[in-house]
Image (cartoon, rainbow, N blue to C red):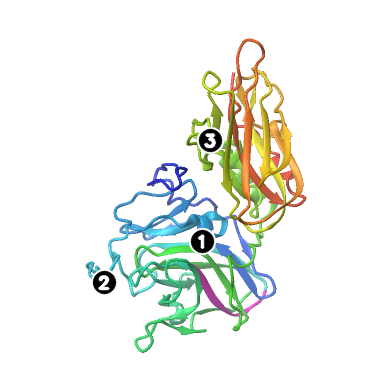
Amino acid sequence: MAVNHILINAQSHDLDKPIKNNTYIIEEKDGIVAVEAEHFYKQDLTDVRKWYRTSKSEMAEVGRDDDNQHSYDASSNCYLEILPDTRVTHSDKLVVGENFSNKPGIVGVLHYKIKFNTIGRYYVWVRAFSTGSEDNGLHVGLNGSWPEHGKRMQWCKGKNKWTWASKKRTKEEHCGIPHAIYLDIEKPGIHTIQFSMREDGFEFDKFILTQDKNYTPTGIGPEVRVAMKKSDTQLTTKKRITKNTSYFNTIKLANTNNKYLAAQDFPIESNNFYKNGKNWLAIHPEKHKQATTSTIFNFKSGRYDIVFVGVGENDGNSNFKMFINKKKIGEYNPPLTDSLFEEGKRFNAIWRRVKIKKGDKITVSAKVATDGNEWTRARWAGIIFAPVGKGKDIQDAPSSYSQN
């Protein structure tokens, strides 16, 4: 399925895999903690249903799934959905233990590690996208147990949009009772939070645990706070590199608060760009000498260090310009490389403390160059919007893409 012509076909068997390992730990502070749904470190009990990741450039094709993808309004433009979705309407057959489970911890269990500094009761909020009455339920558990006050989270209002809820379904109140979904943390330290399927097709974006009974999240909710040792970060990065992940895909994950747009997230219809391999946009110099493409910035408004990840080539210095709306943010030419092409820190541009608003238009304009014999292709990998002061640090990773 294509969305705005920029959705990349992905291998579904990869989209159910964790993108974090068990060294990735989220930290509670001042009685609140927020976690992205896709940051689970493990899922199990997946024989009949699995959680699959969807983003602007990824969507699993696993059996029936009638609705479109909803990543553009999701936190970090990424979420999970449990598939296949065989019970879409009330007339579809209900199969207990397959497309429905009123008992928690039986089907499709996600695991997250959280470091709690503060003991006590935490009310559970989840941001979900529900399209009907058969994809609006979930269970939450703690350290392998599934307490009664974690069963049957329910959404009724806010259909067809991302909606925060914290209500428990009962026989008397099908739309749920507020303040009845919670977990009790009795000891400080690292605990495992778990979610399991109640109804297939459930779309899961983010969750919050808060000690404030009167707290109600808005928008995409608070920022995620990571408690991870430096050695753990190095281990995670090393694992990514040994899997031959592209340089862009490595550094975009170097800070959990990074926002990013891969080059292949940009549209290419009628603008002279083409998809070069799995990671780059480029220009065919025999057909065109320049190209321009635009997309929308759908992240939180603020100031960012913008890192433009270019590709060095040995035929000349391509030219790139970046605009926000009609204002030019910067221009640069990646230096020459001895290889045919190469990614890495010295081929990037960085523009610091750039103010940008959600809904702004991001435009990249590129021109090929020549050494008098051959032409470059103006290859580029993407744009990373890093927290202010972090743009320089995130670029320190070896390239895994070069060719002699």
Q: Residue at x 57, y 64 (%)?
A: 35
Badge nearest the viewer, 1 or 3 = 3
What residue would you read off at disc 2? 90
* Sooner in the amino-acid sequence: mark 1 or mark 3: 1
Could you tell me the amino acid type at mark 2? His
**Quadrant of residue 64 in the image?**
bottom left
What residue would you read off at disc 3? 279
Could you tell me the amino acid type at mark 1? Ala
> Are discs 3 and 2 less than 8 Å apart at CB?
no
Mark 1, Cα crowd under 10 Å, few <14 / some 14-19 / many 20+, is many
Could you tell me the amino acid type at mark 3? Asn
Residue 245: give its label. Answer: none
Secondary structure found at label 2: loop
Q: How far apart are marks 2 and 1 (CA)?
A: 27 Å
Q: Which residue is drawn at 51% across and 61% down?
A: 37
> Are discs 1 and 3 less than 8 Å apart at CB?
no
Q: Nearer the viewer, residue 212 or 347?
A: 347
Is residue 189 visible to the viewer in this orientation of the structure?
Answer: no
Relative side of 192 to 28, left or right: left
Q: Give the range drawn in magenta.
A: 118-127
**Quadrant of residue 239 in the image?**
top right
Q: Distance between the residues labelled 3 and 2?
A: 42 Å
Badge nearest the viewer, 2 or 1 = 2
Q: Say above or below: 286 vs 103.
A: above
Mark 3, Cα crowd under 10 Å, few <14 / some 14-19 / many 20+, is some
* Sooner in the amino-acid sequence: mark 2 or mark 1: 1
Residue 37: give its label. Answer: 1
